Image (cartoon, helix red, strand yellow):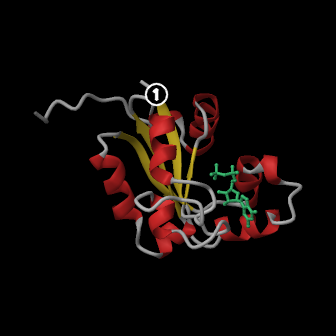
Amino acid sequence: MQKTLILLKPDAVQKSLVGEILSRFERKGLKIIGLKMIQLDDAVIGEHYDFLADKPFFPSIVSYMKSSPIVALALEGHEVVKVVRQLCGATNPADALPGTIRGDFAKSIDNNIIHSSDSEETAAKELARFFKAGELHSYERTLID
Ligand code: GDP
């Protein structure tokens, strides 16, 4: 089954949106296979956003991503990369549709609440970046239905 990596960025934590966002993924039926709070440092932020390192706004991304702990989440499900990107909405909250996480809660492109992997290949790299092997879980949901 496909897996993806989600980061609930500092504004999600500071605005007390962690439960609301987790609930949206759970209501969609996606399976939580990893979850933890982390304080990011320059090294991991630099690695995660290396493709933006030459952008003028890169220093503001680093200071934003360090401004409080974040929540890292690993989800599993059918076409979960695409499903989660749809639930998150467009990168720029001004373009994000109402009903999406960014459309409902994000203020601006530099405070856009959430990250999710953009492909299965990226997801594999990003899951390895934020979770050690023993922190991702494989289990059956036997207590439902
Ligand atoms: P994503 O996959 O939807 O998060 O979008 P991208 O991979 O294109 O960009 C990564 C992140 O960089 C975005 O989520 C924003 O937090 C940030 N970002 C992108 N473009 C801008 C910009 O023009 N200004 C600022 N301040 N941040 C940006």
| Mark 1 C-beta closer than 8 Å to ligand 1 | no
Q: Residue at x 87, y 65 (%)?
A: 56
Residue 141 figure quarter:
top left
- In front here: 126 or 105? 105
Type of amino acid at the residue the image marks with label 1: Gln
Q: Residue at x 80, y 46 (%)?
A: 51
- In front here: 101 or 97? 97
Rate crowding at label 1 as few (under 14), some (14 to 19) or many (20 or more) other CA atoms within 10 Å: few
Quarter that holds the C terminus = top left
Q: Position of residue 29 (x, y in %)?
A: 29, 40
| Badge 1 element | loop
Q: Residue at x 31, y 55 (%)?
A: 23
Left or right, 106 with reference to 142: right
Q: Residue at x 30, y 29 (%)?
A: 139
- In front here: 77 or 35? 77
Q: Position of residue 79 (x, y in %)?
A: 45, 30
Q: Residue furthest top?
A: 1
Q: Which residue is mark 1?
A: 2
Up the image or down, 43 lies above or below 140; here it is below
Left or right, 88 with reference to 48: left
Q: Position of residue 13 (x, y in %)?
A: 48, 69
**Ligand 1 shown in quarter:** bottom right
Left or right, 47 with reference to 7: right
Quarter that holds the N terminus = top left
Left or right, 82 with reference to 51: left
